[in-house]
């Protein structure tokens, strides 16, 4: 895995999901913002494995990319208004209070990129390894191995396998290992392009296998968000520029 010192070309926001309740999961998981109202997407099995996350004392940390590297919001935020799709391993929640109301530098949510990519296309995934709590997220380079509608099995942290159905992307990475990627589920997968094209979201982590990442494509995420009446950022929208 690469360090985020090798920062993305664009500027985007991801979420480190943590649970502060005694006896609950205290590591890290990942999500990403899709609009400036504070709505973020993650994997449903992440919420299932971190039951305390949606409680009043559960919290998220917001990690923000800038040209100078990565930083976090000043204080943890609460998770509210969650909607889930069990079939596609998707969940959308809202961070409260809205972190975009208090940022002091340029930032944007991820832009959903609906087009599928050919076999061998390069992507960059971002997430928080399970032991990375309060540290910077990691980059993982991968290539598209398969893009199709399929059923696949996902094993949440709770230990049971679930069969999920829908459009899926299999990504191959020589860097992938179960130990190194635990906690990165729910994180964004960007098209590996230079410049602000890095803000184009291609897919989302769902599950991991031997040398493969199973991911949910951006067009499926966009459809799910429309069904939940969650507004999605568009490329035509300007970045937020705050003093």
Image (cartoon, grey):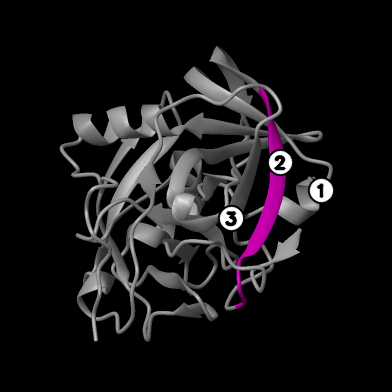
Considering depth in this image, is 65 or 83 the residue closer to the camera?
A: 65
Q: Residue at 77% across / 55% down in the picture?
A: 180
Q: Earlier in the sequence, mark 3 or mark 1?
A: 3
**Relative horizontal placement of residue 220, taking residue 49 as reference (left or right):** left
Q: Is residue 30 left or right of residue 184?
A: left
Q: Residues within 10 Å of mark 1 (few under 14, many from 20)?
A: some
Residue position marked by numbered label 1 in the rendering: 175
x, y (%) of residue 215?
A: 56, 33
Q: Residue furthest left?
A: 229
Give the total number of marks visible in the rendering: 3
| Residue identified by numbered label 2 | 142
* Alpha carbons under labels 2 and 3: distance apart: 11 Å
Disc 2 + disc 3, Cβ < 8 Å:
no
Q: Which residues are magenta?
A: 135-145
| Kind of element beneath mark 1 | loop
**What residue is disc 3 on?**
126
Q: What whole-number distance in Å separates the C-alpha atoms at marks 3 and 1?
A: 13 Å
Q: Secondary structure at mark 2?
A: strand
Residue in the picture at 54% in, 23% down: 168
Q: Which mark is residue 189?
A: none
Q: CA distance from mark 2 to mark 1?
A: 8 Å
Residue 106 visible in the snapshot: yes
Helix, strand, or loop for circle 3?
strand
Q: Position of residue 197 (x, y in %)?
A: 47, 50
């Amino acid at each position: 895995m690469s360090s985020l010192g090798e920062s993305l070309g664009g500027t985007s926001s991801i979420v480190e999901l943590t649970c502060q309740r005694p006896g609950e999961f205290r590591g890290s998981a990942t999500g990403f913002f899709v609009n400036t109202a504070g709505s973020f997407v993650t994997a449903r099995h992440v919420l299932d494995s971190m039951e305390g996350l949606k409680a009043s004392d559960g919290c998220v940390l917001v990690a923000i990319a800038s040209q100078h590297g990565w930083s976090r919001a000043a204080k943890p935020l609460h998770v509210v208004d969650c909607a889930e799709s069990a079939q596609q391993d998707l969940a959308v929640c809202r961070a409260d209070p809205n972190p975009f109301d208090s940022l002091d530098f340029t930032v944007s949510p991820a832009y959903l990129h609906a087009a599928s990519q050919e076999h061998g296309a390069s992507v960059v995934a971002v997430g928080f390894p399970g032991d990375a709590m309060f540290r910077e997220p990691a980059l993982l380079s991968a290539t598209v191995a398969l893009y199709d509608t399929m059923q696949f099995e996902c094993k949440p942290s709770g230990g049971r396998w679930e069969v999920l159905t829908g459009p899926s992307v299999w990504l191959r990475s020589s860097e992938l290992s179960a130990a190194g990627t635990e906690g990165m589920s729910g994180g964004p997968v960007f098209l590996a392009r230079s410049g602000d094209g890095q803000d184009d979201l291609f897919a989302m982590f769902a599950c991991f296998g031997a040398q493969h990442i199973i991911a949910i494509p951006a067009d499926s995420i966009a459809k799910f968000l429309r069904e939940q009446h969650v507004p999605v950022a568009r490329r035509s929208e300007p970045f937020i520029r705050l003093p």
